[in-house]
Every structure is written in structure tokens, then in C-alpha cells.
Image (cartoon, rainbow, N blue to C red):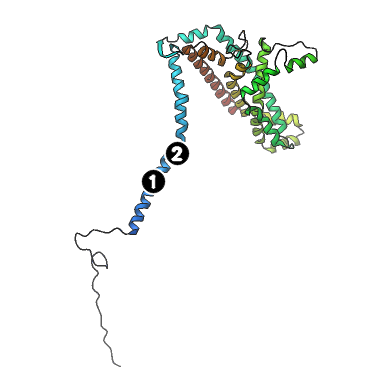
Amino acid sequence: MTRMATRHVTAAPPAKGGAAPGRPPGATKTKGPMDKDERRRARQSRRWQRDVRWSPYAFVSPFFLLFLAFGLFPLIYTGWASLHQVELTAPTEMNWAGLRNYTRIFDDDFFWNAAHNTLTIGLISTVPQLLMAMGIAHILNYKLRASTFYRVVMLAPYATSIAAASLVFVLLFGRDYGMINWGLDLIGIDPVDWQGDKWPSQIAVSTIIIWRWTGYNALIYLAAMQAIPQDLYESAALDGANRWQQFLHVTLPSLRPTILFTAVVSTIGASQVFGEPLLFDANKGASGGAEHQFQTLGLYLYEQGWVNQHLGRASAIAWTMFAILIVIGIVNYVISRRLRASS
């Protein structure tokens, strides 16, 4: 057997930089299609990062711009104007008055009359309103036919214009031609001057507020009732509790935070009542009747600022009302903390 010699061929070492022939010195690297795609993706990535970072601020900026223009600036300006003697006819001519506008307010009998009227109208409208809303929500919480229709009907007064509702109630409470006095005459009661007397006029204004806001609060109570676990009602029924006892011992304790919320919101709304008494006045003025019998703080503010044109005093009244709202908020905070601690 003949041994055949094997020839070993030694490969040349690869050139520096790879198997491809190297670039001559001074030559520049050419950009291929992949390099262009990479640059485009890098630009898109940077735009995407900027979009993710700044888009949320752009989305919420309209609110803050509107708040600065129509919320914060008027608040600061009225606070500064309340320390000056300034008239609406010349708002740039300010004379320093210090706290004189505030001291004049507390010495003004019309201010205390408006504060008393605001308190009484608030009580007359808020308490029956929340009680009726609770009862309506309790009825709607049961399985009824066309329940969605009833809920829409409950919300319809809230969607109605204040002007339209007030004008309708002015016709209902007319002294000589109103339907309310016509019904009272059928049962032998003399006609009532709903716009001229103090208590009848406040009851009439409160009726407008009750009509507009009862359905709104009823839907809030209904939503809270539907969030109560059914196991609580089943346990109460097994213990022999009837529907009234279930309402007292299950529904009401579960609704305490919601009741507190609606009470605070209704109180704040009552302290700012303006449209209803303004349009209920027969003379369509800001005096709240011939003897200021149903003039609220909102009407008193409007009368001082836009009728008497005392911008400084009106600003002081506005800040006084703002302080009252702060006190209401503090009371709400204290009560809510105690409720959470007790529960």
C-alpha cells in the first residue's frame, strides 16, 4: 500500500479590520440604508420621549389657564380692592382704606338682615330637600318598572334653567292670580302675599330651591344605597327586621358619609343663593323685596357692587362669604374625622 503524502496549505492571516480589504487612509465611511433608518428611529424615539413627558402638561394646561384668568386673578384682585375705597365707575382709582370696608359691613344692618335671610332660607330649603331626597332614593332603590325613566325625571329639574323655573314659580305664587292661592281659597284660606310678606316669600324662594335640587341629591343617595352589600339586608331580615328597621339600622349608618357630603354641599349652595330670589322679586331688583325680606348675601353683594357701584365694599362682602365657606369646610373636616374614628 502506497502512503500518499498529505499537502498542508496554510491560509493567509486575515487583514486587519476583517476579511474585506481595508479602506485606504483618509477614506470616509459611507452611510448605507440601515444608517438612515437608525437615525429616523432615533428621532422618532426622542419625539416620543418628549411627547410622553410634556403631553400631560399640555392636556391639563387649559384648565389652569382658565383658572388663572377667571379664578385666581379675580380672587386676588377682589382681596386687594377690599382694602381700598374704589367705585365701579373708576376701578383704577383706589384710595387705601385698610379694614374700613370690613368694619362697615359688620355695622351694617342690611348685611345682618341678608345673613339672617340666607340662614333661614338655607334651613327651610336644605332640611326638607335632603329628607325628600332620601325618601325618593329609598323608593327608587327597589326593583321598579321603568326605573331609568324615573331617574331621568328626577334629574330633569336640575337641568332646567334657573330663570325658567323661577318665572314659573312666580306665576304659581302670584297673590291675585296664582294657582297656590287659588288652591288655598278652595279650602277656605285667605290669599297669601307670597312676595310681600317675610316668611311666605322665604318659603316660596325655598320651594324653588327644593324643586331644583331634590332629584339631584336623590340620585346621589341612590348611588350610595346601591353600593351597600346585600348581605347586610339579608342578615337583618333573618334577624326579623322589617323594611323600616332595615332602613334605620342598615341604610342610614351606611349612608353617613354621603349624608354629610350632601349636607355640606347644600349648605354651601344655600349660602350662595342668588338667581332664585333675584328673579322672584316683582321689581326684578337686588333688594330682595320692598323691605329686603328675602335678600340673601348674594343679592346684597350684587346690590353693593353693581347697583350702588361700591366695588370696595362688594369685594369685602365677597371675602366675608369666602371666609364663611372656609369655616363650613373646617366643620365638615372635623365632623368627617369623628365619623371615621367612630366607625
How many residues crowd mark 2 within 10 Å: few (<14), some (14–19), many (20+)?
few
Going by the numbered disc 2, the residue's amino acid type is Pro
Mark closer to the chain start, 1 or 2: 1
Element type where label 2 sits in the image: helix
User: Which element is circle 1 on?
Assistant: helix
160 relative position to 21: left or right: right
Check contact, mark 1 vs mark 2: CB within 8 A.
Answer: no
Res 265 quadrant in image = top right
Q: Can the viewer see residue 216 in this picture? A: yes
Give the quarter of the image for residue 158. top right
| Quadrant into which the N terminus falls | bottom left
Tell me: residue 299, above or below residue 148: above
Q: Which residue is mark 2?
A: 56
Residue 16 figure quarter = bottom left
Q: Nearer the viewer, residue 77 or 144?
A: 77
Which residue lies at the image location 54% right of the left edge and 22% below the top edge? 329
Would you name the residue on which mark 1 appears?
47
